[in-house]
Image: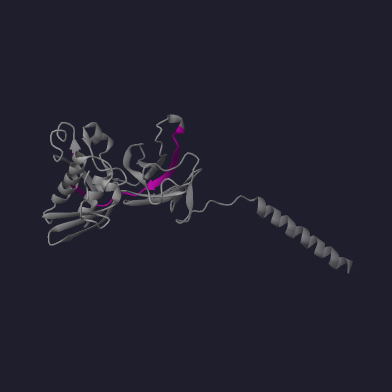
Amino acid sequence: MNKIILVVVILAIIIVALLGVLIFIPGKVSNKPNSVIGTDGLQINGLVANQEISSPLKITGKVIGNGWGGFEGQVGAVELLDGNGKSIASGVLTATSEWMTLPVNFETTLSFQSNMSQSGNLVFHNENPSDMRDKDKTFVLPVKIKASGETMTVKAYFGKSGVTEVNCTDVVAVDRTIIKTQSTAKSAIEELLKGPTDSEKLAGFSTSIPAGSKLNSISIVNGEARADFNETTESGGGSCSMASRVAQIKQTLLQFSTITSIKLSINGRTGDILQP
């Protein structure tokens, strides 16, 4: 009997010891695609460190405070840097829920090209309307950039210093290289909504289309391009700004020979849109 009791006691001690070891072993960070990664105040869905990414890359997540928050429909920005630290894509983290109330959900899509597979970094920046440097927040996520496939060139039309000031509807084309696609009109508008790149800005290009503008849908029926945008697309601005927005969108679509006319709408509404 005493031997049985002794065996039971020994087994109990072993079980307790094993439980203690399991409790103090740190958990592993999940490498599953549906995991959440980020920093205090920022959560990013579906990405993990050193994950291979390809274009187009849709990024979703939410901000929950600690210096990360929303302002005028956006919660910050993200930039993709290649192995040499050069920016090859950037996007606004657009709020998909009420931006004035935390947490704020966001999304953006990055389109980029890389002529080889390489390491890179996604650099997230918080929205800092105060423009005070001590309030800047960043989060760097290392990634593996997959080499791009076949590419093509589309045009996006912007205002330009010395041109748009003379006539609000005079816009100038810039070339954008994108992954080859059948949805060329959609891709061209998406490039337009990104706004001018830093180098294009230095060359005097600008846009009248507000940050956070989004293409809801586009279809081409008997030569008519029917493009529907969100409400941000017509927010703010006077008559010149609105005229410039319409010109930017229309000229970007009219570059394609299959499009002969254009019908614009805002969340399905066609009457009295894009007015000051």
Q: In this view, does 218 lie above or below 86?
A: below
Find residue 245 and report its horizontal and vertical position in percent: 20, 44
Image quadrant holding the C terminus, namely top left
The answer to whether residue 22 shows anywhere in this view is yes
The kind of secondary structure the magenta stretch mainly shows is strand
Q: In this view, does 163 lie above or below 175?
A: above
Find residue 231 and report its horizontal and vertical position in percent: 29, 50
Total numbered labels placed on residues in the image: 0
Q: Residue at x 45, y 37 (%)?
A: 137
Find residue 175 and report its horizontal and vertical position in percent: 19, 43
Q: Verify whether residue 138 appears in magenta.
A: yes
Q: Which of 268 and 12 is in front in this view?
A: 268
Left or right for 49, reference 232: right
Q: Nearer the viewer, residue 154 or 52?
A: 154
Q: Verify whether residue 76 appears in magenta.
A: no
Q: In which quarter of the image is residue 156?
A: top left
Left or right for 32, reference 150: right
Find residue 208 and report its horizontal and vertical position in percent: 23, 40
Q: Which colour scheme is used?
A: one colour
Q: Residue at x 85, y 65 (%)?
A: 5
The magenta span reads 135-158
